[in-house]
Image (spheres, grey):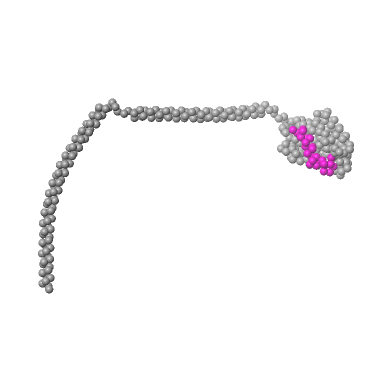
Amino acid sequence: MDNDNRHNSNNNNNNYKRRSSRYNKNYKGSSKKNYSNYKNNNKHRNENYQKNSEDNMDFNITKQQVFDFDEMKFSDEIDTSFVENKRKKKEQIVDELTQSYEKGKVHQQKREKKHHSKIRVERFVTILCILALLGTCVFLLMKPEKTKVITKREEVVVMDDNYLFLGDSITEQYDLDEYYNDLPVVNSGISGNKTKDLLNDLNNRVYQYNPSKVFLLIGTNDIQSKVEDDVIINNIKKILEDIHENRPYAKLYLEAIYPVDEGSSGAQDRTNKEIQSINASLEDYCKKNDITFIDMYDLLLDPESDKDRLFEDYSKDGLHISDEGYEVITEELMKYIK
């Protein structure tokens, strides 16, 4: 068996060698033949390429020559329309730039005009302010200096507007701030005061306020206290004279003593007949001494009564005044304040 295997193995090797020998012979022959064909073909290709290159060169030269010849021959017939279009386009651009410049110039002129107008307005306003300031200065310089009044007690400066109400409880209960809103008013009334009380305290009651106007109402408590009529009248005259001597610039107003409702508890011992008699004497004195007399007596009477008496709607107790009564009084006094 081993011999058979060796024999088969030798046969196989011999067959392989024979096949390899035939393959190598065929390959070598085929390679030489292919190489020869390749070489011949390559030679032909080179020759053809060289020939084609020469033909192409001739063609290019001929084409260039023809082109040059045509250009030389027909140079007078070249299309120049693009030059004309370019010129028109340039003119159009110039026109557009010119229009834009003109518009800008117009806008600039408008802005300058507006600016100049604003400057003129500002200058005008400035001039007006300066003139107003100068006018104020001139007015202040030309305005008379306030008079300094030398009194028995002190040196005072005159007040432009200062309205003083002087009297007793009827004045004290008079709400001046309510009835004379925003006006420079001073309430110098004290409940229970008589004419003698005012005479002894004019410095505190009048002079310290340096009033420009004085409204005096006094005397009803003197009547209730059985002070003689002549004393009451003389005391009121002295009050007016003393104020005029110490505050000569002050305008004096004397109010008539108000009527009473004799049947009421507030009237007590007061009578309208006595009040009328005193008022008549005071009115006569005022006319002779250039003092304004304000007749409140008739204004406060009951219009439906046959005899003189204080109107019930104007009074709280037959003597003192109600809010409605003060409204009537204010309306009358306002004529002398404004």
Q: Is residue 58 left or right of residue 284?
A: left
Q: Residue sitting at 85 percent across and 34 percent down? A: 279
Q: Residue sitting at 55 percent across and 28 percent down? A: 117
Q: Nearer the viewer, residue 331 or 174?
A: 331
Q: Is residue 246 visible?
A: no
Q: Is residue 177 visible?
A: yes
Q: Residue sitting at 81 percent across and 35 percent down? A: 255
Q: Is residue 2 left or right of residue 202?
A: left
Q: Position of residue 179 (x, y in %)?
A: 75, 39
Q: Which residues are magenta?
A: 311-338
Q: What type of secondary structure mainly makes up the magenta span?
A: helix
Q: Residue sitting at 76 percent across and 32 percent down? A: 250
Q: Position of residue 4 (x, y in %)?
A: 11, 71
Q: Position of residue 277 (x, y in %)?
A: 88, 34
Q: Nearer the viewer, residue 27 or 264?
A: 27
Q: Where's the C terminus, which quadrant?
A: top right
Q: Nearer the viewer, residue 166 or 93?
A: 93
Q: Is residue 13 left or right of residue 332?
A: left
Q: In the image as oriented, which residue stretches furthest toward the bottom? A: 1
